[in-house]
Image (spheres, rainbow, N blue to C red):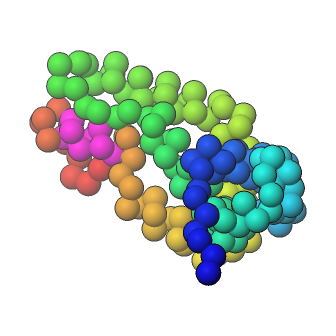
Amino acid sequence: MLLPVARSPTKRSAILAAAAAELREHGFQGASMDGIAARAGVSKRTVYGHFESKGALFDAIVKDLAARSSRALTGVYDPRRGLRAQLSALVRQELALLADDEFRALARVVLSECFRSPELGRDLLARTERDEGALVSWIRGAAADGRLAVPDP
């Protein structure tokens, strides 16, 4: 009987970083698990030990991209600050994220894959609609405070 292999968070991070680089360079169709393993400095078996398929790895990268976006955009409404200053800060955060070459390149790969696979596109759209963004959250806070009249942020 085979014992389950312990999954190292460090190796998982290395695999995700390698996969992101491979996707940016070759796109989803051109990326290979062999190339990802080589970039990560692990065996192909280790890659499959963490991710059952290239699709599962791609999904993890999409989730990581969304989490990175969420961390970069902190849209917490502050009733003590002016609306203009808060909105300006949100816009600066968004622009900084969009100015990041690595983020843009990976986002392009994800979007192009959505065009190739309408099912993936629908899934990502549904996920995006479930996850309230920083701006929507901020608008809800300002509306609840009576500083904005927005029926549906």
Residue 67 part of the magenta segment? no
Q: Is 141 displayed left or right of 46 in the figure?
A: left
Q: As rendered, which of 52 and 77 lies closer to the eye?
A: 52
Q: Is 94 displayed left or right of 42 in the figure?
A: left
Q: Which residues are magenta?
A: 136-143
Q: Quadrant of the N terminus?
A: bottom right
Whether residue 53 is situated above or below residue 12 in the rendered picture? below
Q: As rendered, which of 48 and 3 lies closer to the eye?
A: 3
Q: Main secondary structure of the magenta part?
A: helix
Q: Residue furthest front?
A: 1
Image point 17% across, 32% down: which residue? 147
Q: Residue furthest bottom?
A: 1
Give coordinates of residue 98: x percent, y percent.
61, 35
Residue 55 shows in this picture:
no
Occupied quadrant, residue 71:
top left
Image point 25% across, 19% down: which residue? 82
Image point 45% across, 68% down: which residue? 126
Occupied quadrant, residue 51:
bottom right
Q: Is 95 displayed left or right of 88 in the figure?
A: right
Image point 70% across, 71% down: which residue? 53
Q: As rendered, which of 41 and 59 lies closer to the eye?
A: 41
